[in-house]
Amino acid sequence: MRGILVCSVLALCPLAVAYPAEPIPFELPEGAKVIKGAGRQAGWGLGLQTNCLVVVKPDPQETARAQSLGPLAVDAEFRKREVTTVEEWEKVRAGLKKRVLAYFGTLPPKDAPLDVKVEQEGQDREDYLFKVVSVAFDQDHRGRIGLLVPKGLSKPTATILVNDRWGGGIEPASSGVYSRAIGVHFAREGFVVVLLGHWDEVFGKSTTLCTAGAATHMVLRTMSYLETLSGPVDPERIGYWGHLYGADLIPFVASHEGRLACFVASCTCHELVPHYETDFWRPPFWAQQGDNMGIATRTEPKMYYSARSVSTHPLPFLTQEIMAFVAPRPFLVINAERPALFEAIRPVWQLHGKEPFLEMITHRWGTNEPVHARDYTVDFFLRTLCGIRPAHAPGETVKEILDALRSGEAGRQVVAARQAAWWRCKEATADLVGLLGHKDPALRRAAAKALQRVGAMREMTPHLKHPDPIVRLMAIEMMQIAGTRDAFEALAKDPEDEHRWVNEAKWQTLQVNPWP
């Protein structure tokens, strides 16, 4: 096996899963209840309306208004007409890609030798392995790639490329603050996780390449590296998760990388550029910042800096135009606002007959990633990468899970616990509880995650003082998802914990505000 470590102590017999040719669109989760309706938005929540997401449903009037503005075009004269066919869109897309390339500058050759080097040998973190490698970015620079591999994998599985862009890249996403260490959370869900770092400081003063171009090129290099692995990564099932910078980067990555199967944008700062009856689309106020990209973010433009002279008056492309590069692939947007942009890009998915693959959820936790939003994201990746409908496990699959959990073979049990989590298999609750005290940390943590996913709060509450801090963490997250009064009372009575993540999870859970 090249370039990655896989746990060899567990000889596994993974359960068979059939992956459909088309991703499964969203459906209202089992047991969810509608809590409010407000025009474009209809909500569903769990518990006492303290933890709820709002699923933004299509608004025909808003979509028609956005499409009537003709947002999909390359030049001024074309912006006064609509794009009505896939063929017209493909022509527009090709022109937009040329303009994006012109803004990027000179990209290094994407087919240059990778020259893979191990920067940090695999660390055993009990339920997953962590490793850092580097590849040649160009002749003068190397790019670091972090790899989190859940223990117990014996065949290629779904993989998530995480571009967190929050406080430094690889390290915070793998071992940093609880609410932002998204790579660890995904790894404990059973996904292989690939982490990328920052390029701002390296290319911020480049005269040949802006930092958005550098970050995009690094994603291309990373995807090429993943294709060389003969281990746990399935190159046909790789999704992208981006937060802040990483989310702002999505349209640029989507314009150049066709190997990514789906995208999730968390807390993106992209805005809808308003339409004016003039010969061009006026740049937004936050684009007036000299020779930088400007268009992609109004809060952290340094990602798009370069020392090259690039005109932003007017900009050669619009936010809604480049966001449409993702189409027709599944796309989940997690944000607290900006549904207008969401509706403006919907026509492209409609052209392809893939409107259900464009989803948006909102919550009111700002840049934090609350547990219930993360849980929904996991379901999105399961539907789009694995063809799994959580809470809809076929009878034969349930039987296989139960047989494996009862086999007494740790390898099979780890796989079965993760399958129980993915399918939200409630029938496995009693067997999973019995594994919480297993000596293998990978197994007991997989069992705790599965119990969290199936909503077994009554079974998890007694484990707030479990000797394994990650099991305690799963119990606390279960309380945040459920949001019932009993859960908060139990959590408030529990004394201070010595584990940093557990304490932060408690604080985050107790700070949940009631939805108005």
Image (cartoon, rainbow, N blue to C red):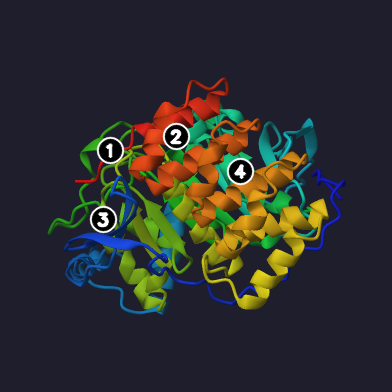
In whole angstroms, how far apart are the C-alphas of marks 4 and 1? 39 Å
- Viewer-side residue, 415 vs 237: 415
**Location of mark 4 (residue):** 218
- The disc labelled 2 sits on which kind of residue? Met
Residue assigned mark 3? 339
The residue at which mark 2 appears reads as: 303
- Which mark is in front, 1 or 3? 1
Residue at disc 3, secondary structure? helix
Foreground label between 3 and 2 = 3
Marks 1 and 3, how far apart at CA: 23 Å
The amino acid at mark 3 is: Pro
Amino acid type, residue under disc 4 in the picture: Met
Quick one: label 1 or label 2, which is nearer the N terminus? 2
Instruction: Describe the element under mark 2 as helix, strand or loop.
Output: helix
Q: Considering only order in the chain, which callout, 3 or 4, is on the residue closer to the N terminus?
A: 4
The one of 193 and 92 positioned closer to us in this rendering: 193
> Disc 4 or 1, which lies upstream in sequence?
4
Q: Nearer the viewer, residue 237 or 224?
A: 237
